[in-house]
Image: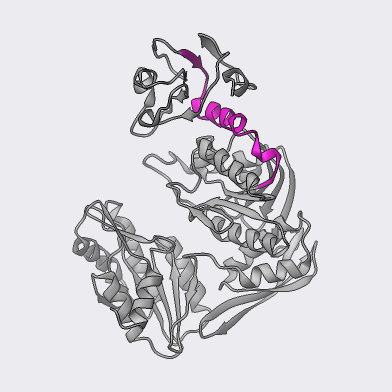
Amino acid sequence: MQLKNMLEGLKYTCSGSVNMEITDIVYDSRKVVKDCVFVCLCGSSVDSHDFAQQAVDAGAAAVVAQRPVTVRNAALITVENTRYAMAVMAAAFFGHPADQIRVVGITGTKGKTTASYMIRSILEAGGIKTGLIGTIGTVIGDEVIQTNNTTPESYDVQRFLRLMADSGCKAAVIEASSIGLKDHRVSGFAFDIGLFTNFSPDHIGGSEHKTLEEYMQCKNMLFKQCRTGIINIDDENYPGIIEGHTCKIETYGFSQEAGLRACNEKLISRPGYLGVHFDLCGQLDFGVDVDIPGRFSVYNALAAVAVCRHFDVTPQAIAQGLNTVKVKGRVEPVKVPGNYTLLIDYAHNALSMENILETLREYQPNRLVCLFGAGGNRARSRRYEMGEVSGKLADLSVITADNSRFEDVMDIIEDIKVGIAKTNGKYVVIPDRKEAIKYCMENAQDGDIVVLAGKGHEDYQEIQGVKYHLDEREVIADIIDGKI
């Protein structure tokens, strides 16, 4: 593609010619290919402007920069923001795939992954092939492509959208994280629908957001980049989320003011199945069952329905999609031979653990058992808080390893015990995670709910900087088969 065509719509100055064929867009100098355009990105630890000439020497025909650099033997394009420029260029390079499929963006502190899977489940039940980009990876048909971030870089977002369009997808759902929005990873196109789930303090400090206000402003960006915005009206922060919006606004929630409401919700419980029933009121009028427990599942399901009613799907497809949806590592049930319920969940901080444990408490288990650890090389306060939450809400805490990274797992466990000591909660310490899971299964009683918290969809455990394969579903199967 001609460089000048990739730059359409951008304000830029140029030293050299833009009348050249470009083979690819590259933002990592180690991956330069002949006649590519190299985009200089300012990262939290590395500024690739420093590698501009190195990229040219390796074969780049042009460089895009946002601060002064000197390059020889290549065109130099200067723009205000290289991340935004890369998004616009990538959309053009891949043939504007968002013009060929309907794209839904989801933002919010919690619920993005579950809501995205619910939307996909409903749409596919209605015969609409749908791709996903999010925390668990990029899903196109039966293929799952692993990604490093909830929202990948804009080049990869556009590449995946192109793959989806070419494979026959008619819709795509993207988890638009606050960092993804801040870094313009989903710029360069308009979402058909933007969805807001909820807002609470998170991702503040370090290389993420400086303040809570900035965190909200980043989420707000989605509603200046979509045609229809769908908002959880029950969340008190929604006015700040949609401030200055440029889209049509619709609402959902339990509130009587919501356009689409949930009514008459009730829990569904039997060994191996924890779910919820509710009736849709307002814009739709029928009942649905959701195979994921808790009130937050009603919100996620309601959000998904609010999105999917804009597609050509029947009430039967909506009901089927919600009653069969499976989200890897999100309150995920795993079949076991005993008369108890075993769940895998991604809860890995105090807030998410509190949410899942309070939700499971509502099902009145014989005992609520929580297995968890904490990540190494992270704030020690998180460990205290997690220990205290589990001690208060679980009948038994099984403290074990998570991703200890470069720390000693026993040091992490001692920090967790500081928090649990503030409560009267019972606990056992089993540092080996496989042995801890085996302990939970061998000691489970009839009517217990056992939740394995922290790993969720992850299939590895990081120890001393090395990632070792560990998929809790496989561990459970091996325990059942007597291999562990």
Count of marks, rendered view: 0
Position in image of residue 467 (x %, y %): 29, 55
Position in image of residue 277 (x %, y %): 66, 76
The residue nearer to you, when weighing 306 against 465, is: 465
Query: Magenta stretch containing residue 89, yes or no?
Result: yes
Q: Which residues are magenta?
A: 75-103
- Residue 10 sits above or below residue 229 on the image: above
Question: Horizontal placement of 344 versus 262: left or right?
Answer: left
Write the residue at 61% across / 52% down: 131
The residue nearer to you, when weighing 408 against 383, is: 408
Quarter where residue 292 is shown: bottom right
Write the residue at 64% across / 73% down: 323
Residue 401 appears in the figure: yes
Position in image of residue 407 (x %, y %): 21, 55
Position in image of residue 406 (x %, y %): 22, 52
- Residue 33 sits above or below residue 380 on the image: above
- Residue 339 sits above or below residue 175 on the image: below
- Residue 393 sits above or below residue 407 on the image: below
Question: Horizontal placement of 148 versus 327: left or right?
Answer: left
The residue nearer to you, when weighing 336 against 185, is: 336
Write the residue at 61% across / 56% down: 235
Write the residue at 33% across / 58% down: 382
Quarter of the image with the N terminus in it: top right
Quarter where residue 357 is shown: bottom left
Residue 425 appears in the figure: no
Query: Magenta stretch containing residue 438, yes or no?
Result: no
